[in-house]
Amino acid sequence: MDNVMGANEELAAKNKAAFKEADVVAVNVMGSPGSGKTTILENALGPLSEKYKLGVIEGDLFTTRDAERIEAVGAEVYQINTGGSCHLNAAMVNEAVKEFPIDDYDVLFIENVGNLVCPASFDLGETLRVTVFSVSEGADKAVKYPKMFRRAHAVIINKVDLLDHTDVDLDEVRKDLREITPKASIFEVSATTGEGLEDWIDWLQEQLVKLQ
Ligand SMILES: Nc1nc2c(ncn2[C@@H]2O[C@H](COP(=O)(O)OP(=O)(O)O)[C@@H](O)[C@H]2O)c(=O)[nH]1
Ligand SMILES: [Mg+2]
């Protein structure tokens, strides 16, 4: 296992250098299956594309469904199929980056495989990490899967439009997140109604300015 992690770290460092060289900010979007990662991207790409050149890498086990959804909103997308693996690794992203004109992009979104465990352990060389979970999954996800939240620069609590149909107490979720990931910016969003999404888009733009 140490060898696997060592090899991954080496390639992640290569990816990081390639992103820096290309002057592109790579955003690793992680979270549970169905938490709304693709929906968030679908709705954020339009506003962001007014200012920035965007590319998207879609990670999935076998299908190209998410890539098709992203293509439908007019973004350039590269599909990685992991063949059953529960996370992307740096080697997969390294291959993708060779095929993808990252020099042309300001931001490269990488939608990881939906999973709250494995992707947290595999650095891809990304610049920013965003963890998404939704209120319909229950209030305890950050407490149960802390690693996925601890390293996040931003956490999106999605599907707040469904709050009334759940027993989730947002105050409790916020308090847990403050303890687990004190530095992360927290966003309460409904990707489908658009509520709160602008705040996350603004945050992302602030990061892009800081990183320039
Ligand atoms: N009610 C509600 N549904 C959402 C929201 N965001 C995503 N969904 C739905 O949740 C399902 C999974 O979303 P998807 O973006 O595919 O999740 P992913 O697996 O994390 O990429 C889809 O049916 C979406 O329409 C939201 O904010 N509110
Ligand atoms: Mg998806």
Image (cartoon, grey):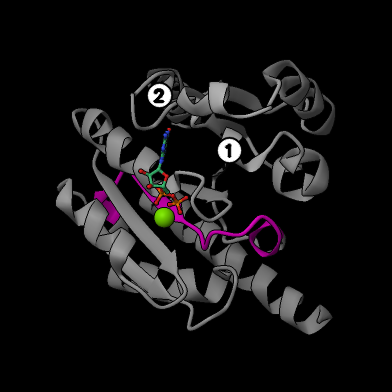
Looking at the image, is 148 positioned above or below residue 198? below
Residue 197 lies in quadrant: top left
Residue at which label 1 appears: 136
Q: Is mark 2 on a helix, strand or loop?
A: helix
Residue count near mark 1 (Cα–Cα under 10 Å), binned few <14, some 14–19, many ≥20: some
Q: Report the front residue among 125 and 175.
A: 175
Give the amino acid type for the residue marked by disc 2 in the picture. Leu
Ligand 1 has an atom within 8 Å of the beta carbon of the residue at disc 1? yes
Does the segment drawn in magenta span residue 95?
no
Q: Is-magenta flag for residue 112?
A: yes
In-image side of 72 versus 148 (left or right): left
Residue marked by disc 2: 197
Q: Nearer the viewer, residue 94 or 161?
A: 161
- Residue 68's spot in the image, x, y percent? 23, 61
Query: Which label sits on residue 202?
Result: none
| Residue 169, above or below 7 | above
